[in-house]
Amino acid sequence: MSKIAVVYWSGTGNTEAMAEQVAAGARSAGAEVTVYPTGVYEGFAPRDYDAIAFGCPAMGAEELEDGEFLPMFESVESQLGSKKIALFGSYGWGDGEWMRTWEDRCRADGAVLAAESVLCNGEPDDEGNDACQSLGSALTR
């Protein structure tokens, strides 16, 4: 059984809804899933998981949230080499630049992206929910 972590920050609840769907997709594929929500990253250690889904919405000028999420991400970034990960997040403007930048950063860290990242403009719709569940499932392969 795969051990999957879903680690996210959500300001409006949109990325939280996506995280719930990612976790559901991983569970339905037979994984043991631990969810680390906004501000509750205590005890999260990448080495304890086979794969990790990270979720963060676009903030400001298409950047990762820098009050809670980015410091946590930076603290574990050096542990992502060869780790299978997936990225997801919501946005309300722009063209997804924050996600492309984040993907490039993760690749430079040596992480392996398990699937195409999932972006939802605002609250996830049925298509977004399906994409998030598929993302969670992809982490178990």
Image: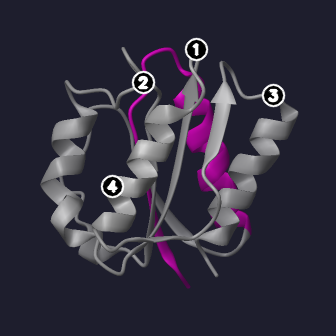
Q: Residue furthest right?
A: 126
Whichever of callouts 3 and 4 sits on the residue coming sooner in the sequence is 4
Q: CA distance from mark 4 to mark 2?
A: 14 Å
Name which residue lies at 40% across and 47% down.
102
Whichever of callouts 4 and 2 sits on the residue coming sooner in the sequence is 2
Q: CA distance from mark 3 to mark 1?
A: 17 Å
Q: CA distance from mark 2 to mark 3?
A: 21 Å
Whichever of callouts 1 and 2 sits on the residue coming sooner in the sequence is 2
94 relative position to 42: left or right: right
Residue 137 can be seen, yes or no: yes
Q: Position of residue 71 (x, y in %)?
A: 16, 39
Whichever of callouts 3 and 1 sits on the residue coming sooner in the sequence is 1
**Which numbered dot is residue 62?**
2
Q: Dot 3, how many residues are within 10 Å of its Cα: few (below 14), some (14-19), or many (20+)?
A: few
Q: CA distance from mark 1 to mark 4?
A: 21 Å
Q: Dot 1, how many residues are within 10 Å of its Cα: few (below 14), some (14-19), or many (20+)?
A: few
Residue tagged by mark 1? 93
Above or below, 87 against 16 in this view is: below
